């Protein structure tokens, strides 16, 4: 909920804006059959979870998945992201 409250009020225009609030947010490029997507992945809840988002700047955020750190490492979240 803390992340949601911040993101809801944010006026992010690029990843650098996101990193001013969340320095460990990462842009992850995912290769899909119809082109590439760039997900922004946040470490949340003390690095216990990965929040996978698609951000359309300026600041339209789509939350695509929330995974534990372990599930993020072993789960094929990229394929799910490509499917929509």
Image (cartoon, rainbow, N blue to C red):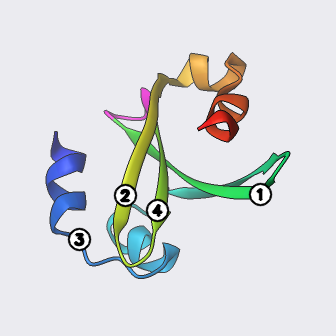
> Given contact means CB atoms under 8 Å apart, are the residues at marks 3 and 4 in contact?
no
2 or 4: tag closer to the N-terminus? 4
Q: CA distance from mark 1 to mark 4?
A: 14 Å
Mark in front: 3 vs 1: 1
Q: Which residue is located at x 50 percent, y 73 percent? A: 15
Q: CA distance from mark 1 to mark 2?
A: 17 Å
> Given contact means CB atoms under 8 Å apart, are the residues at marks 3 and 2 in contact?
no
Residue denoted by label 1: 36
| Picture coordinates of residue 10, whole percent (x, y) | 23, 71
Instruction: From the viewer's perspective, tell me whether residue 69 is left or right of residue 61.
Output: right
Secondary element at tag 2:
strand
Secondary element at tag 4:
strand
Give the main secondary structure of the magenta stretch.
loop
> Given contact means CB atoms under 8 Å apart, are the residues at marks 2 and 4 in contact?
yes
Q: Which residue is located at x 60 percent, y 26 percent? A: 72
1 or 2: tag closer to the N-terminus? 1
Q: CA distance from mark 2 to mark 4?
A: 5 Å
Mark in front: 3 vs 4: 4
Taking 16 as reference, is 52 above or below it? above
> Given contact means CB atoms under 8 Å apart, are the residues at marks 3 and 1 in contact?
no
3 or 2: tag closer to the N-terminus? 3
Q: Nearer the viewer, residue 78 or 2?
A: 78
Residue denoted by label 3: 10
1 or 4: tag closer to the N-terminus? 1
Residue denoted by label 4: 55
Q: Which residue is located at x 71 percent, y 17 percent? A: 74
Q: Look at the image and give the residue range highlighted in magenta.
A: 45-50
**Where residue 61 is drawn, which disc sits there?**
2
């Amino acid at each position: 909920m803390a992340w949601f409250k911040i993101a809801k009020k944010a006026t992010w225009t690029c990843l650098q804006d996101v990193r001013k609030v969340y320095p460990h947010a990462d842009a992850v490029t995912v290769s899909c059959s119809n082109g590439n997507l760039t997900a922004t992945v946040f470490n949340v809840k003390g690095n216990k979870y990965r929040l996978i988002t698609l951000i359309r700047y300026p600041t339209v955020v789509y939350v695509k998945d929330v995974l534990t750190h372990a599930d993020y490492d072993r789960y094929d979240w990229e394929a799910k992201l490509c499917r929509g």
